Amino acid sequence: MHSNKELFNFDQCSNCELVFLNPRVSLDHLKNYYTSHYLPYRGAKAWGKFEQLVEGSQKKLDLRRVKRIKEAHKLSEKSLVLDVGCGNPTFLKACQQEFNCQTMGIDFSDEGWKDQPDDFTRINLQVAEIKDLSRKIQPDVITMWHYLEHDYTPFENLRSLRSISKSSTTLVIEVPNLNSSSRKKYGKNWAGWHSPRHLSLFSPKNIELLLKKSGWKVSKTLTYGTMDPYLLYWMSEMEKKGIRWDKNMEDEFMQFIIGMIKFLPKKWKEKTSSLAFMTVTAHPE
């Protein structure tokens, strides 16, 4: 999702099979890849006259995430949901509406919410890093929706989150799955590389190892996520095509919908074989 033609290198650990960007872009330079043109920050507005249709899709995604949280943890008005890497915090708004609970979101940039101050007034939003969080907050649920693959220090940050958690805290992580069929199909054009924003590409084996070493015990691993796997297939096709990600996406919309319909038979397999993503639920060990 960046318009230049830079090439980046990934290495793989011969022991745990973790794939990681090497060398990494410096943190100061990385902000050049998270501009106002970044598609997730642009959200539905990127699709021009189809904006309202895409907004409806985002709401459905948020509700799927709310459902995933409801299945993992019982929440009340006093519960706190902490979303790490919250971006445009529509998920937290959906949590408020469903549970009437406390919500907090952190991100290293406010690009996802700064232009919508009236939409998220009741959410505690902060430009912050995990290490900045107070030990007093003790969240009941911590979510990482496609955050961990962006993290420069995942081990240290997972340990830090463990230190501010209660024994009953639930951690929910959704990431691209390196072992998925989409990665095997698209190779270097796989949108899961998302270089240089994605620093680590996980598979079930090494993410469980990472969580265990940082003080968490995995209770469930799913071969799918809340995000439609078709999105990763479509983005990979767009990478092959070489489109400009900062353009108005209107002229891609009809082909996007046609592709989604054609993808439906494949989507039925996602609960038995990972197509794109995986979800891991864990608790303090």
Image (cartoon, rainbow, N blue to C red):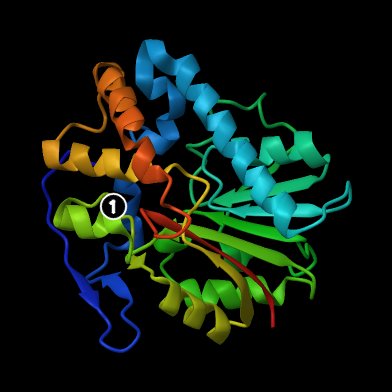
Q: Position of residue 135 (x, y in %)?
A: 75, 70
Give the residue displayed 50% in from the left and 36% down from the top.
112
Instruction: Name the element at disc 1.
Output: loop
Q: Position of residue 51 (x, y in %)?
A: 44, 17
Which is more toward the observer, 81 or 281?
A: 281
Q: Is residue 135 above or below residue 68?
A: below
Give the residue displayed 41% in from the left and 62% down from the top.
149
Q: Position of residue 242 (x, y in %)?
A: 13, 37
| Amino acid type of the residue that numbered disc 1 sits on in the rendered structure | His
Residue found at the far top of this picture:
49
Q: Is residue 102 above or below residue 84?
A: above
> Which residue in the structure is indicated by mark 1?
194
Give the residue displayed 41% in from the left and 29% down from the top.
42
Give the residue displayed 78% in from the left and 65% down from the top.
138
Q: Quadrant of residue 71?
A: bottom right
Which is more toward the observer, 38 or 262?
A: 262
